[in-house]
Image: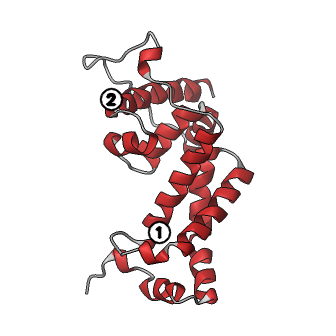
Amino acid sequence: METDIRFTHRSIVEQCKAGNASSQYELYSRYVDAMYNVGLRFLGNTEDAEDIVQDSFVEAFKNLDHFKYESSFGAWLKRIVINKSINHLKAKRISVVPMEAHEFHLTEEEEPVEAEATDILKVKKGIAQLPDGYREIINLYLIEGYDHVEIGEILGISTSTSKSQYHRAKKKLLEIINEL
């Protein structure tokens, strides 16, 4: 019998909705490491990532009545962590720079840059060295799997700006990796 991933941990979530503290701790224990990794990828700082994860769990537990199993609990919580991480970066005034502010523009005819098979540690180091705006785009698109329309909505930018920022970020990432 096939199970629907949206209902993973449903009994624990329902117990949390009823105010069961041990169920809250169980959900926290199951997801804290994964959510910390998401926060760390965006923020690049352990203290900020820890704060964002704690705030995200508090918000999730306060708003469990709004969780309607349209996705898995983990996906719902991950979205909270991502949004809080992005809001944190925005509060620090780290923004994605619109393409119009630069002389470099991508065109549809431009050849895509192909990467060689690269050591995953180099990729992680390269992502960590990217400017924050580029790291946001790379994390949202490559790691979290959002498309450019969704990224545009999350970051408050146009779809074309998301695409161009992604291409610039990817090019910069390849430069960094090649220097490592």
* Within-10-Å neighbours for mark 2: few <14, some 14–19, many 20+: some
Q: Which residue is mark 1?
A: 74
Give me the C-alpha separation between circle 1 and circle 2: 29 Å
Identify the residue at horizontal 44%, vertical 9% (top origin): 103
Of the pair 148 and 30, the residue shown nearer to us:
148
The single residue placed furthest to the right in the displayed view is 47
In the rendered view, tell whether residue 156 sits above or below residue 102. Answer: below
Residue 75: % across, % down = 43, 65
Q: Quadrant of the N terminus?
A: bottom left
Give the side of residue 106 with respect to residue 65, left or right.
left
In the rendered view, tell whether residue 69 sits above or below residue 88. Answer: below
Identify the residue at horizontal 59%, vertical 35% (top origin): 132
Identify the residue at horizontal 38%, vertical 48% (top origin): 146
Residue type indicated by callout 2: Ser
In the rendered view, tell whether residue 19 sits above or below residue 153. Answer: below
Residue 153: % across, % down = 38, 43
Q: Quadrant of the C terminus?
A: top right
Disc 1, SS: helix
Q: Which residue is mark 2?
A: 160
Residue type indicated by callout 1: Gly
Residue 92: % across, % down = 66, 38
Residue 41: % across, % down = 59, 48
Question: Splitting the image into 4 quarters, where does residue 152 fall?
Answer: top left
N-terminal label among 1 and 2: 1
Count of marks, rendered view: 2
Disc 2, SS: helix
